[in-house]
Amino acid sequence: MINIPLNRVEGDLELHLELDGDRIANSWSSGIMFRGFENILRGRAPRDGLVLTPRVCGICGTAHLLAAAKALDMLCGVIVPDNAVMTRNLTLLAEHIQSDIRHGILMFMNDFINPLYQDQPFYSEARLRYEPFRGTSVIKAIRETKKILEIIAIVGGQWPNTSFMVPGGIATTPTFNDMVGCDYIERSFTGWYEREILGCSLERWAEVTSLADLDTWLEEKPDHTQGDLGFFIRCARMTGLDRIGGGHGNFISTGLKDLQPYSTRAVEPLLMSSGFIAKGEKFEFDQALIAEHVAFSRFEGYGSGLHPFEGITIPAFDPNPDKYSWAKAPRYNDHPAETGPLAEALIDGDPLFADLVRQQGPTAFSRELARFTRPAKLLPLMKKIIRTIDPKAPYYRPVGDIPDGRAYGLIEACRGTLGHWLEVQDGAIARYQIITPTAWNGSPRDANAIRGPWEEAIIGTSVKDPDNPVELGHIIRSFDACLVCAVHFCTRK
Amino acid sequence: MAVNLYWMHCGGCGGDSMSMLNAESPNIIETIHELDINVLWHPSFSFAPPADHRRLLDALISREVGLDILCIEGAVIRGPENTGMFGIFEGKPKKNLVAQLADRAGIVIAIGTCASFGGVTGAGATDAVGLQFSKKDIGGFLGKNFRSGKGLPVINLPGCPVHPTVLMGMLTAAARGVSMDLNTYNAPLEYYSMLVHQGCTRNEYHEYRIEETDFGQKGCLFFHLGCQGPLAHAPCNKFLWNNRNCKTRSGVPCNGCTEPDFPRDDPYFYTPNIVGLPIHLPDGVNRPHYLAYKSMAAAAAPDRLKHRKTEV
């Protein structure tokens, strides 16, 4: 048995491993920090979640704000003006792109300058590109991601941690000139992303729809191998990332919604579709099928899974060797499921990732490829939104006092499916349950003793040096782990 | 001579590290190069394997490697029952490591409100506190008598998150050995003597008591919508956020995230008031005079403000 602390994830994670020779025979993933949010929201005013839940996570606060606002919209039964829906989505997409690039360039790629790879042909170039605070790609990624976040500041005040989304729409009123600012930022960022990350235009990349296409694309021009994406593909193949990190093969995504599905007007097409995939078969997404287990989580036990509307979160203080994580275990219809850009692409029917997973299964490579290339899909959506927002039309519809009741907000955050489930009683928050993407991906075992997605994904992996388990780093980081997020908020009074 | 810096995440969300990446002129790259800062470890960006990290920690604790600047992000988790087991590293309470490293450091900087005063993490049930304050009370985790190697208390840089310009400025002061004058809560006066309200583009509306009761308008948010701008100490309207904007300018009430009692118990987006006047007046203001001034100001308000003709 060995214990490995892992950094370059948001929050604190330790892996407990049982090795058979150099292969991982069994694994336990422990979220080792508990922030105990139980008392923070309970009893507070219903809108307070708009200020406090973005502070759950420093890298995806806009996503938490959106989930919180959508839960309150639902509770109020309000039809949010189109302008507000679009502005909210615009900021969510900007946050996604920021996170995808920061994770890829600042947190994932520097595993390739691990000492283990010193003799690899890519090593010296990787070092030039990805050394923390010094690498050429690092410097550019910091400069450009900072720029795309200005869009959130322009329309929402600041990033991170604004609270500009409110039930009924948004509190701000972006002007024509604000949209001009957003337009130029998006255009400049797209130019950089095409030039430096892809090494080709968004249009050329969109033509890559199979593994064979990917190989053709890579060999087509030096620009394609020299971009960060091409460099990633070359390093990943030389280090075998396309052969490790499989997992259960279950995926979940709530898609990306143009307009809320619960609004009374006709539902417009989703920008990306929602669903659940198990063993290659796709099912419709239904939040009622989500349940959280605590059999192996450090919380007071209850039989099997509970839907978040019934969720209970009482930390278990007694040392119990079975209970090994501060994260709960969310399950969809009793299945573990991975979530994130790869799940999003598969559920949306993206042909490249469908082909990759058909031929190789899900891997550390396919997950990170999906993350690196997601901005290619999101940037055109941003442009469309920026050009469609009408600064003269309303951004807000007054809702007055928030009524009692239950509601939820479900969205795709950068790392995957995020849900807030809210109950208001006598004008105050009685229960607030959050299920984050990393709660899905990094969950411990459930009541049926089934491993969580990344616990499963590392089984069978060969670890050459337990003091330097870079193989595990690749796999866990391909899930873009964010342990600070895997928290639970509020119990029954 | 390189300046050694070690960055540690405790009970927080990592938002201050993300905010750090947004610094502009100087940005984080320029700051590190100009000051010759040697980032021994940053949990979000360092690539050394776990065993190398352990050796580094041993070398810091044995003083074999000098520690000039210790940056701590997040509150120190002490629970349950003072065991610290709600937040661990290598199976042991992380708070022990905080104490060991703080003892070795030339200067200790609390990055953000959680590390300074407890903040959002401190509002939870894990007995989490700031490094040298617990909300407004001095003491915190290290105790009121703590002094770093250079004889300084913990320097607090509150904010949820910390403003990146404040962070770059303080790193520069620390690396060059410039002493900063501090306020009651050991935060540099240069950044924390001003109020969020100063420089807000809605100030003229505030001046003539054009106060809004709902979102989406151009007037001031202080009287009814819970804005803490005239009470919160921070340079948000001087430096702005992301070089562009800030919450109050865009119409989002300030929630006072730099204050020692953040998050307060009062509801957000709502101002407790007596006969239409906020209970908590701007910092240091005399109530009867403020009442008289506001009545006269409202009477003097020009139509262009009353009719929200002036853009903000």
Image (tube, coloured by chain):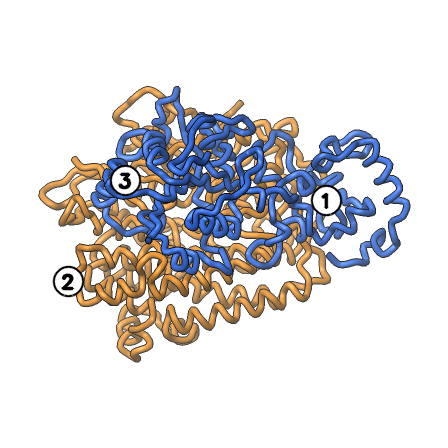
Please name whichever residue, B52 or A67, is drawn nearer the observer in this view of the structure.
B52
Tell me how far mark 2 sits from mark 1, CA to CA.
61 Å
Eye-nearest disc, 1 or 3: 3
Q: Nearer the viewer, mark 3 or mark 2?
A: 3
Residue at the image position 50 percent from the left and 68 percent from the top: A380
Q: CA distance from mark 3 to mark 2?
A: 30 Å
Give the residue type at disc 2. Asp
Does residue B170 appear in the picture of this structure? yes
User: Do discs 3 and 2 belong to a common subunit?
Assistant: no
Q: Residue A119: which disc?
A: 2
Residue for badge 1: B221
Tell me which residue sits at (39%, 61%) in the image.
Answer: A349
Specify few, some or many for label 2: CA neighbours under 10 Å numbering under 14, 14-19, or 20 or more.
few
Display colour for chain A = orange
- Where residue A446 appears, x then y in whole percent? 32, 34
Please name whichever residue, A427 or B258, is drawn nearer the observer in this view of the structure.
B258
**Residue found 22% across the figure and 45% down from its top:** B52
The answer to whether tags 2 and 1 share a subunit is no
Q: Residues within 10 Å of mark 3 (few under 14, many from 20)?
A: some
Q: Can you say whether A15 is above or below B304 in the image? A: above
What residue is disc 3 on?
Answer: B60
Residue occupying the point 71% across, 56% down: A394
Image quadrant where residue A44 sits:
top right
Query: Element type at marker 1?
Result: loop
What shade does chain B have? blue
Describe residue A301's horizontal placement relative to residue A246 as left or right: right
Mark 1 nearby-residue class (10 Å; few <14, some 14–19, many ≥20): many
Residue type at mark 3 is Leu
Give the secondary structure at mark 2.
Answer: loop
Q: Position of residue B246 (x, y in %)?
A: 62, 52
Res A297 visible: no
